[in-house]
Image (cartoon, rainbow, N blue to C red):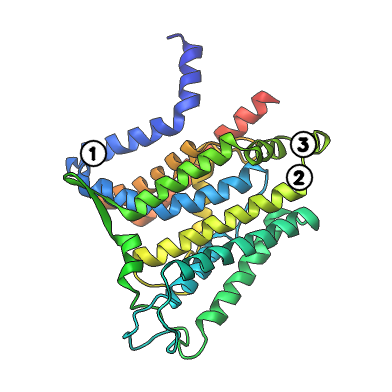
Amino acid sequence: MNVKKMQGFVSEYAIYIVLAVLIIGITVYDPNFIGISSLRDILVQSSTRVIIALGVAFILITGGTDLSAGRMVGLTAVISASMLQMQDYPRRFFPNLSELPLFVPILLAIAVGLVFGMINGIIVSKFKVPPFIATLGSMVAIYGINSLYFDMDPNNSQPIGGLRDDFTKMGSGSIGIGPISIPNIVIIAIFVCFIVWVMFNKTRLGKNMYAIGGNEQAAKVSGINVSRNLIIIYSIAGALYGLAGVLEAARTGGATNNYGNMYELDAIAACVVGGVSTTGGIGKVQGVMAGVLIFTVINYGLTFIGVGPYWQQIIKGAIIVAAVAFDMRKYAAKK
């Protein structure tokens, strides 16, 4: 393999090389890192994050960004948790609410995320507000709405707990396959990844999304209804944030209005590290998955070997800057 081919290979698979180096390095330091328990913990911690990151990837590929993702996760976590408490729990959010079928609050939370995503899409596409400003405004507004809801009587801003077993099993239960059990939340995340992969690669919406991110004016000239596609894309992203909020409440067994804080920055970072271009038009599901895994391995693995959280932040920051610099170099070379 000559130098040019080697450079091409490294450029194409850089994200996976970094992930492998991280895992090998931590394992060399502490061989106990490689084990079923560690793998399970990493996958569980990655599950909600990858769903959020996939929602953000939709937006980034169109050339936009979404700062409201984390606050949507928090709102939908609170909504689903508030309606899925045990009947005999002494501090119920809705004391007189009858036990609802499990799917009703879940679908309601996802629908709330979809509606706020659609609002973002309308603001961006119809009113031509830059995505950064539009989603910054909605981020602040959604947190205010969530805080008002969370502060309603009789809850009065108390952490929501006492969630039903059938709900928490979504986040903490598992399905046994032979001697191995696979967490339910991981199965859900894998299914979502597959659906999003199909949308990215096998649907007209996916093709339009890449076309809009590559060159919006050319997309308009080719007959793509950019405004309609953006509204649909932002709505799908919002629905994914809603699902992630539901799973986060189920995983942790509770919710507060501060859930999801700063999750959008982790999601954007994972997308960028995973090869989703900051200039739009480029991004793959498998890259996003690898980006999420890298940051989870950093958080979990470095904690596992006793590296302090401040050093973890420095390492994460360096990886993000390096990934963006690498992305911009590729973009400049193409230009």
Left/right placement of residue 235 relative to residue 36 reads right
**Which residue is identified by label 1?**
27
Kind of element beneath mark 2: helix
- Residue sitting at 38 percent across and 55 percent down? 310
Q: Name the residue under label 3.
A: 219
SS category of the residue bearing label 1: helix
Where does residue 188 sit, x and y in percent of width and height?
40, 51
Q: Do the residues labelled 2 and 3 touch (CB within 8 Å)?
A: yes
Indicate the amino acid at tag 3. Answer: Ala
Query: For the residue marked with disc 2, what is the amino acid?
Result: Val
Report, in whole angstroms, how far the alpha carbon at label 3 lies from the one at label 1: 47 Å
Confirm whether residue 126 shows in the render. yes
Q: For this view, does 149 lie left or right of residue 159?
A: right
> Left of 48 or right of it: where is 88?
left
What residue is shown at x 65% (from left), y 62% (from top)? Answer: 136
Q: At which x and y percent is residue 87? A: 34, 83
